[in-house]
Amino acid sequence: MQKKQKNALFGSLYGLVLSANLAALSIVLGKYLAINIDQYIRISFENLPIIVGGFFFGPVVGAVIGAVADLIGCVMVGYAINPIITCGAAVIGAVAGVVGWLIFRNQSTRTRRTVAAFVATAAAHVLGSMIIKSIGMYVYYGHALEVLWVRIPLYICIAAAEGALMAVLANSRVFTRERDKIIPQRRSNKNDDVQ
């Protein structure tokens, strides 16, 4: 029963369509609506759909959305596929999913849901965007590490903006109601009833 709930998103047509839409939205935000400052620095909200997928539907779904969005986006625009950056995109979804499942699922107050949204977004950006993707740019493209330090304040600002949007979604009854149609809340078992 628990295995069926974990794969509920990919096991339904609605879930597959939702995941594909989140990946497509990430491609549009990251490849077509981004503001390119330099060849290694761009302002975009490409990670927001990936974080949404991970936070609300779990780490596996978030990782798949991130990897698919990066791979298809690179092919569509003509960028060389960098496996470390693809791994960073997958890690963004996975980290948001782990934090979402650990903190968000059992929180009922608005403040705790808001904190969970900000923590998930910040953790995903620190590990995926600031560390792994920067390493990928350094290894594959030879950018100087001093230049890549600019990505840290940039992603702090992007994470703050995305965290605010995630907090709105986490506190939206309409959005969480739709999420619960796909992945129902865990039912309490006999041990939970005894305690």
Image: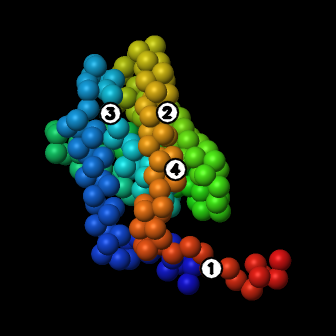
Q: Residue at x 56, y 84 (%)?
A: 1
Answer above or below: position of 83 versus 155. below
Between disc 1 and disc 3, whose residue precedes?
A: 3
Location of residue 104 in the rendering, given as x and y in whole percent from the top left corner: 60, 57
Q: Tell me the residue that label 3 is attached to.
A: 44
Side of 72 relative to 90 (left or right)? left
Instruction: State if disc 3 and disc 1 touch (CB < 8 Å).
Output: no
* Viewer-side label of 2, 3: 2
> What is the spatial separation of the Cα atoms under label 1 and label 3, in whole angstroms?
38 Å
Residue 96, numbered label: 4
Colour mode of the rendering: rainbow
Instruction: Note whether residue 179 is visible.
Output: no
Q: Earlier in the sequence, mark 2 or mark 3?
A: 3
Q: Which residue carries the number 2 mark? A: 160
The residue closer to the viewer here, 109 or 86, is 109
Q: Which residue is mark 1?
A: 187
Q: Is residue 31 left or right of residue 122?
A: left
Look at the numbered disc 4 and give the secondary structure of its residue. helix
Label 1: state its secondary structure: loop
Asked whether disc 4 touches disc 3, contact meaning CB atoms under 8 Å apart, the reply is no
Which residue is at 22% across, 35% downward? 33
Work out which residue is located at the far top of the displayed protein and give it. Answer: 146
Q: Label 3 is placed on what type of residue?
A: Ser
The amino acid type, in three-letter code, at marker 2 is: Ala
